Amino acid sequence: MRQGILNGLRVLDFTWMLAGPFGTRVLADFGAEVIKVQSAKTAKGAESNLTGYFNTWNRNKRSMTLDMNTPEAKEIILRLTEICDVVVENFSPRVMSNWGLGYEKLKKVRPDLIMVSISAMGQTGPWKDMVGYGPTLQALSGLTYLTSFHKDSPLGLGFAYADPMIGLYAALAVLAALEYRDRTGQGQYIDLSGYEVSCSLIGPTLMDVASNKKAAIPRGNDSDTFSAAPYGCYRCSGEDRWCVIAVSNEHEWEAFCRVLGNPDWTKEEKFSTLSRRRENAEELDGIMSQWTMMHTPEEAVQILQEGGIPAGVVQNAEEVARDPQLEARDFFVKLNHPVLGQAFSDRSPIRFKDASQDDWKAAPLLGEDNRYIYMELLGFTEEQFSSYLERKIIQ
Amino acid sequence: MGCPLENLKVLDLADEKASFCSKLLADLGASVIKVEKPGGDASRNIGPFLGNESHPNRSLSFNHNNMNKLGITLNVEHVEGRKLFLRLLGKHDVVVETFLPGYLEKLGLGFGALSKINEKLIWVSVTGFGQTGPRSRDPCYDIVASAFGGQMSVSGALSTSPLKPFGEQSYTIASLYAAMGILLALKRRRQTGKGEHIDISLQEAVVSALDHVMVRYFYEKVVPRRQGERSWNNTSCLLPCKNGQLFITLFPQWETLVEWMASEGMADDLTDDQWSDEAYRLSHFDHILQVVKRWTLTHTSDELFELGQLMHFPWAPVQSPQEVLDNPQLKARHFFIDVSHPEMDTPLTYPRAPYQWGCSLERRKRAPRVGEDNIEVYQEELGLSEQEMERLHSLHAI
């Protein structure tokens, strides 16, 4: 197992897909023993142990198999819960209690248990049984609506963004509950709603609409909140290459004019103050594009950043993978997987300055840790273990 | 039952890049003091504004990110200000800051120097690109982190420019990591007695939360592009209805969906045998979209949402923020709370933290005004006299 701050912490992990596994991965990355409960029936699609996705979201974890629909499953989980600190699950709200494994039951065998239930809508309310992926919640939260150039043709984000955010809140909840347990000896139950997480991502805008009684409409890359001009995404030379620029105060504007060689147009009255520049943003953007089109995004951004102006290259996956800044910080690490071979994965962005770790472990194979869990942790004999295998309780 | 973090004491020197970090902790009961330069932090100039009036106390984004904190002013560039800062440090567990690397070191306030004075100190730096590497000293805003981090390359359509996700998402992701870093450091400090310096990069935070994007590149050498209202794997998309748009998945429940459309005479040729083959469907996706779109246009998005959910389809209408405020599920769970602003007649609506705990997280104190708690913190906690306060004030140290 991985060395880390959370060594000694044991987590029983019922999560699947992206949100839950992303959350428990934070704990595994820092040394918690995360035991993922799987079965041959559930290890399919995104939950198949031999996919890149699984390897990425489940690194540093252990895997056990157990058919939850067998009568023996409940007893095994109760015995495991006794020796676990944390249980995390992201089933629909009734599933755990239908198995007789709701928080109240689990708490009986482990009084200081920390349990996080992640669900799409939360454990209560008229919509509690509704189902949703990350993009479902993004659509319901206003994030999809606002990420667009026009209110009648929403575009949204090109990836499931709500899921990792839900996972991060789940991990934060576990860590805060641990702090509480360390201090008071008491456990905790946390009901985490994916929908609420998604709405939190546009908190100030919801306050704006509520208090100012005005509609918030999508504005593309323009921002009516962050006061800057030039501001936005500009086409550069090359095929479909782009950069972003944000000039938000007089200091940055002066630097910007200097970098461009103080051409006459920068001295015109219509660009003389930030508010004038914002009023004439369209014209300014036109002039900007003429300049950026003469450069690759890397050139344009280098010129601007050297002058102290915030600017960025719109990088695709390949460019991110080769980004010199990320490379200098060893952001991508290698996972050696027995079947998938050597693969790359992004390091945890939580970096302790003097403790960089390199013992990254690939995701487990299906049931890889069965013997350890059933025999070492639960004390099964060889005969019991074989019998459970034969009866397909351990799959 | 107390709050989970009620013993934790945090000094928040962060601007908009990470003020949400200590807000997350304050919501869980931590005591946080927002430390602003005299006159107030520049993040007070970020909108939207209450009453659409740009004013340091009316920034809703500042109010959102700094709720449940106390507020003091302190000039770290003044020698007297630095002395006060050191005294405050002795009484706090954690510092969160967002200055460009090197700025605080120059003032003698870097983690290296300060941890020698107080080895228990936990220090979090949130910057655009982290404390090391060739870009570490480059300035950064959300749009820059979003571009460099890959979000924009996959959002928007090929007919448009790349599109930044709405809001200040890089700040939100980084703040979540920073808050977890603090709690991890606290755990280690219990074991070792020593603090930590935690280095968070906005760019890395963005890359970490890209779902399929890096995975597909690393495993399949596919470089995902932006493809408008269609999902990356063409299994879901946004489609117009009689009113508004619907997020709709097409493949996981294909047979049921076709049956449903056929029962309304809208399935066209999709009942033919070849469509039961998923590979065929993926290669003829445009035709499917045309047919399904003709059908969705005969319904409202709410109808399809309700009926679809009965069959466990993860569909949902694309809601505007106004619709979010009126949402029955959020109302039933009291997701929107009233926070009183004593200087106003009516309280303001805020979203609460997105989880419910066994203990109550009921603190609802609006964000501080500039220097609002100077007296409480400097006089009552540090024991400064009124005369000293006046002197420091005239020196612009506070």
Image (cartoon, coloured by chain):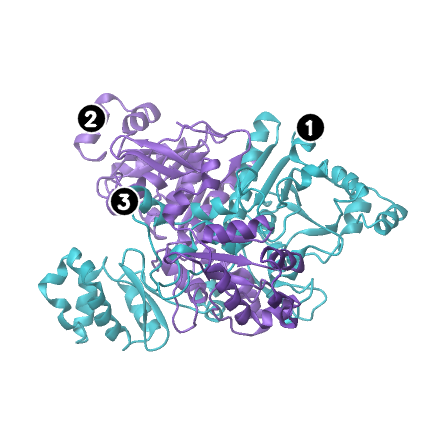
> Is label 2 in a helix, a strand or a loop?
helix
Quarter of the figure with the N terminus of chain A? top left
Q: Is residue A16 visible?
A: no
Q: Which residue is mark 2?
A: A386
- The chain that hosts pointer 3 is B
**Residues at marks 2 and 3, CA–CA distance in whole angstroms:** 39 Å
Q: Nearer the viewer, mark 1 or mark 3?
A: 3
Q: Which residue is mark 3?
A: B220
Q: Which residue is mark 1?
A: B116
Between tags 2 and 1, which lies in front?
1
Same subunit, labels 2 and 1: the answer reads no
Q: Earlier in the sequence, mark 1 or mark 3?
A: 1
- The residue lying furthest to the right in this view is B387
Q: Residue at x 20, y 69 (%)?
A: B260
Distance from label 1 to label 3 (Cα)? 48 Å
- Reply above or below: B175 against A74: below
How far apart are the alpha carbons under marks 2 and 1?
Answer: 57 Å
* Circle 1 chain: B
Where's the C terminus of chain A, which quadrant?
Answer: top left
Residue B109 coordinates in the image, percent (x, y): 70, 37
Amino acid found under the numbered disc labelled 2? Ser
State the cyan chain.
B
User: Looking at the picture, which amino acid does disc 1 mark?
Assistant: Lys
For this orientation, the residue located farthest to the top is: A382
Viewer-nearest residue: A300 or B376 = A300
